[in-house]
Image (tube, rainbow, N blue to C red):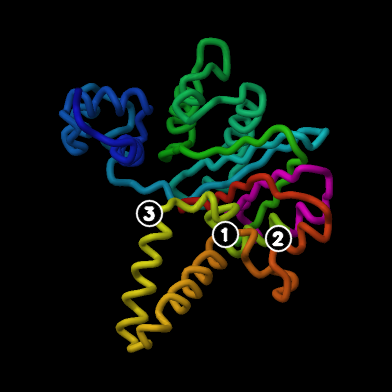
């Protein structure tokens, strides 16, 4: 079997607009070489490959769908080439239909989603390919999040008033609190934390930060005896940058997000932040 990564599949999809399974098959046949896989797709007559090759789908929209009882929600990014298409009714209808399908079927991952049937005899991948043809641009679906179980809320942020939301945040609390859910989701949209708590930060990431902090401190000529304390302080500073519970709260920087949640008597169970193209 050819040696290639998920990143190679994603790159090939973005280069050609072809379906995930078509891209995997092409990479298998091309021994994992992306350029050869592009050529293979073109030779096989994959619709639109020649026209879309090299194009970048960095515009688009983030859409959300929250259940009436607020116990489940979906966040989904659909990308296209231009903001003109992104704000069109047809593009947004496709994005919302995909979000509704995720809500109804709860796919385990992207591959499962793309292979699932959204209409009689039509997979999600075929549905997206059809949008490619109808809208005349590369349309890419490669990210979604779904939460079920607690109190789920979404915050959608528009970077431009005439465009659909470009940033979306989905949060899940252990109990209902609409105000706190909204405040925390807005905070996440603004400050872009990467992790919920310290336990989620990979050990190798922490060790790398520790090495950098120590090397930086030595370069600055800090006293040897003081290094452990200085390094620990810098690592803690790193956590405050990337861990949402340790960040200074957007509406009151004298409190951490954890403090705000504690005062409200709720727990943030998980979150997802999606920004178009990033």
In three-dimensional space, the C-alpha distance between marks 2 and 3, rounded to whole angstroms, equals 25 Å
Which residue is painted at 35% across and 83% down in the image? 224
Rendered image: mark on residue 204: 3
Instruction: Tell me the SS state at disc 2.
Output: helix
Magenta segment: 160-183
- What residue does disc 1 label? 243
Q: Position of residue 231 (x, y in %)?
A: 43, 74
Mark in front: 3 vs 1: 3
Examine the structure image and report whether residue 170 is included in the region drawn in magenta. Answer: yes
Residue positioned 74% across, 49% down in the render: 267
> How far from the left and from the top, in percent, is residue 154?
70, 47
**For marks 2 and 3 on the same chain, the one whose residue lies earlier in the sequence:** 3
**Residue 205: mark:** none
- Quick one: 73 or 198, which is closer to the camera? 198
Pointer 2 residue: 258
How many labels sit on residues?
3
Q: Is residue 84 left or right of residue 189?
A: left
Above or below: residue 13 compared with residue 26: below
Q: Is residue 50 visible?
A: yes
Q: What is the residue that sits farthest to the front in this orientation?
A: 225
Q: Would you say the residues marked 2 and 1 are in contact, meaning their CB atoms lie under 8 Å apart? A: no
Q: Residue at x 34, y 67 (%)?
A: 211
């Amino acid at each position: 079997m050819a040696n290639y990564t998920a990143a190679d599949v994603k790159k090939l999809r973005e280069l050609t607009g072809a379906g995930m399974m078509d891209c995997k098959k092409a990479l298998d046949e091309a021994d994992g070489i992306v350029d050869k896989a592009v050529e293979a797709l073109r030779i096989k007559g994959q619709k639109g490959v020649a026209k879309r090759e090299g194009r970048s789908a960095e515009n688009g929209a983030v859409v959300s769908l929250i259940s009436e009882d607020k116990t489940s929600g979906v966040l989904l990014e659909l990308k296209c080439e231009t903001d003109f298409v992104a704000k069109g009714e047809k593009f947004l209808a496709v994005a919302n239909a995909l979000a509704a399908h995720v809500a109804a079927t709860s796919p385990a991952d992207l591959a499962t989603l793309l292979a699932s049937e959204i209409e009689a005899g039509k997979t999600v991948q075929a549905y997206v390919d059809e949008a490619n043809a109808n809208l005349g641009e590369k349309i890419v679906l490669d990210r979604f999040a779904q939460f079920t179980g607690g109190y789920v809320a979404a915050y959608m942020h528009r970077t431009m008033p005439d465009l659909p939301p470009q940033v979306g945040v989905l949060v899940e609390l252990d109990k209902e609190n609409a105000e706190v859910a909204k405040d925390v989701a807005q905070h996440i949209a603004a400050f872009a934390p990467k992790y919920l708590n310290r336990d989620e930060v990979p050990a190798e990431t922490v060790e790398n930060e520790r090495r950098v902090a120590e090397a930086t401190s030595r370069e600055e000529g800090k006293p040897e005896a003081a290094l452990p304390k200085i390094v620990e302080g810098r690592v803690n500073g790193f956590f405050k940058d990337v861990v949402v519970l340790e960040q200074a709260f957007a509406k009151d920087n004298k409190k951490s997000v954890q403090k705000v949640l504690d005062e409200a008597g709720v727990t943030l169970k998980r979150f997802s932040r999606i920004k178009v193209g990033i």
